[in-house]
Image (tube, rainbow, N blue to C red):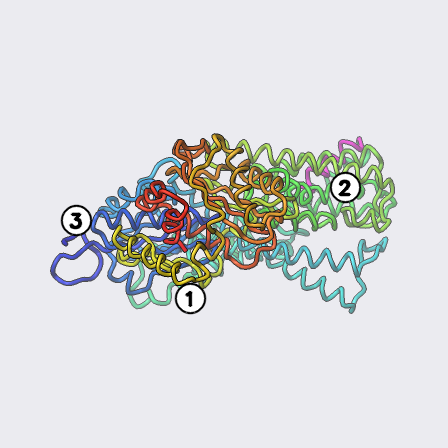
Amino acid sequence: MTSPAGLPPTGGGSGERQRLKLLAVTACPTGIAHTYMAAEKLSQAAEQLGVDIKVETQGSIGAENVLTDNDVRTADGVIIAADKDVDLSRFAGKRVVTVGVAEGIHHPERLIEQVRTAPVHGGGGSGTSTSSSTNSGGSGGGKERSVGYKALMNGVSYMIPFVVVGGLLIAISLSLGGHTDPSGGLVIPKDSFWMDVNNIGVIGFQLMVPILSGYIAYAIGDRPALVPGMVGGWIANTGSLYDSEAGAGFIGAIVTGFLAGYLVLWIKKVEVPKFVRPIMPIIVIPIVATTALGLFFIYVIGEPISWVFEHLTDWLGGMTGTSAVLLGAILGLMIAFDMGGPVNKTAFLFGAGLIATGNQEVMGMCAAAIPVMPLGQGLATLIRKRLYTEQERETGLASLFMGLFGISEGAIPFAAARPAQVIPANMLGGAVAGALAGLAGVEDAVPHGGPIVAVLGAVSGVPMFFVAVVIGTVVTALTTVALVDVSERRRKGQPMVDGLAPQPELALAGVSAGAGVGAGSDGLGTGGGTATAHAPAQRTDSVPVSAGSAADASPDTTADRSADASTDASAGTSDDDEVLSGYLTAQTVKVRLDSGDKEAAIREMAGLLAATGKVTDVEELVAAALRREAQGTTGLGEEIAIPHAKTDAVTAPVVGFARSAEGVEWGSLDGTKAKLVFMISVPEAAAGDEHLRILALLSRKLMDTGFRERLMTAPDEAAVLDVLREIR
């Protein structure tokens, strides 16, 4: 078959016209359903249009069906349907269309047509953020995030482990090895074991700011931008390089990250002799960009920071005789503004310097404000889990722990990700805590803050100190939730997770604050995971392939498969009624769902699962599933719903299926009622990625129209099981 007219092929091939060969990459940062749904839809559309396609999926269980150099060499075009950064450098010289993952699900045929006239990717930049959004051809939920947003999120995602590891090690060393010292705050004896632990944590903290800057730059300018970004971030965080007692902190790192990234992009555009080009990305660009950025920050940006630091100190010195409430509010605002930056350090050093003069009230105001940011942000992730990704919820728990030990940097990942919402909320909470501490005359005898100093006896007026901290924390959390919620609602109905296209995510709901570090804590985190041996394979060149048995097959092959299954059953195999590794059995299949509304349907499905003996508390299972629904509908559209829960109300993974002739209103975004309902439940301590495989297999296979029709028309439970064996 000849390739459709209109495409100027860019791939290699013989002189005769061949079938159009396309590649695709699908990726979704907070779940796996859409990654596989988009892959399946693109494969189906390509098969219908007579196009060969190979789809690489980058889901929570890792990259699968990875595109090889040979695949890229022979391809005529590439479709990127992703809501996170995808490396485009390997597609240089190919026609590339870049859209959100929702476009891959809803308009796969349109994308295949668009790639015919798509511009050729020039190889600049490392990810989808470098592509022009006008190339997406999408609308609504399919549009890409901005370049700046993707770059910022890239930096934050790499910074978070350094914040968590560094902060927790410092907190542990202070709590177990520290003691109060009037002249030095919380002191850990030198040459002790806990001092070594503390030093390791300090190194983690020192690295987090350069990492933030470096990976912001990397997302914009690719590998040549990594070194100038990291060096620039280190300079920003080292105030001594530009005569400042405090560095510019994470705000300075964001500035250097963007400056480095765009500086590298600009240098790449400079025409150089051909013999110089090979050394440009590894020698010339990093050296020139690093030197230029470093000197620019030291001599141009650093001086104003030093000036601000000195004048803020003088200004605060003139306020010591004013109202304690006003001074406490101002100090709280400053403490919360940049968390380790010049404004924060000015307030902290001002309070610490007055301790020696006998004025301990100013440090008391600072001490009350210091933990409010990490405690407030951590609390916010527990109050409204649906507003946060799983990674953010995990960071929230670490932030709470750091807040208890007065480590304000625990809130930096949240402020870096959503500065317009988080920083004002932090400042409001800090101001409230500082003002209340000033009003109550709280005193702190050591230059440190947080509940730890009160526990160790360095604070006078302990009850009011904790009142100030608690109220400030609650104000911060509630304000953050309100501002983030408003910001997300302005995105025209997109989900309150992390700006993904308006599609329900399969995130298993936890049963308690501890369980889900937030819930949806089924392991469906941001970015990629580790591929498992059970991961479903993808199509290559439109040949149906699947994990276990088969994927999308013709009716004839389906009949053969059913016949084989019957033969196995007659042979007395142990798996004759089992589907999905035995999690779905004849006991958990119901041909007719009696319930007419969602809650009743979930309750009926929970009763169905209870028949297996694996459910210890039906009511808790129902409650966990409903909590997941409250985060966002599990109605996927196409008359499908997959309610699910991660809860200790079950002792082992279990999956049920029921069919509704009339359909149940499930809030699906395409407006269809759910007629095919799968319910998945796994224990909190479920090991491995097996439940991820269930979700991947289901979401992929359910995109097959023929498969759904066979499920709907199967006359009885036995026939339903025969169809469901296709996804075993």
Q: Along the polypeptide, which appears first: circle 2 or circle 3?
A: 3
For residue 375, above or below residue 211: above
Q: Residues within 10 Å of mark 1 (few under 14, many from 20)?
A: few
Residue 8 or residue 155, whichever sits in front: 8
Q: Residues within 10 Å of mark 3 (few under 14, many from 20)?
A: some
Q: Which residue is mark 1?
A: 283
Amino acid identity at mark 3: Pro
- Give the x, y percent position of residue 159: 56, 54
Say what secondary structure mark 1 lies in.
Answer: helix
> Is residue 30 in sight in this rendering?
no
- Range of residues picked out in magenta: 323-336
Q: Along the polypeptide, which appears first: circle 1 or circle 3?
A: 3
Residue 278 or residue 674, whichever sits in front: 674
Q: Which residue is mark 3?
A: 4
- Does the magenta segment cover residue 442? no
> Is residue 453 in sight in this rendering?
yes
Amino acid identity at mark 1: Ile
Residue 336 placement, left or right of 537:
right
Q: Residues within 10 Å of mark 2 (few under 14, many from 20)?
A: many
Looking at the rendering, which quadrant does residue 461 occupy?
top right
For residue 85, above or below residue 499: below
Amino acid identity at mark 2: Ala
Q: Which mark is residue 156?
A: none
Q: Which residue is mark 2?
A: 368
Labels 1 and 2 touching (C-beta < 8 A): no
- Give the x, y percent position of residue 194: 76, 64
Residue 502 placement, left or right of 630:
left
Looking at the rendering, which quadrant does residue 271 occupy?
bottom left
Say what secondary structure mark 2 lies in.
Answer: helix
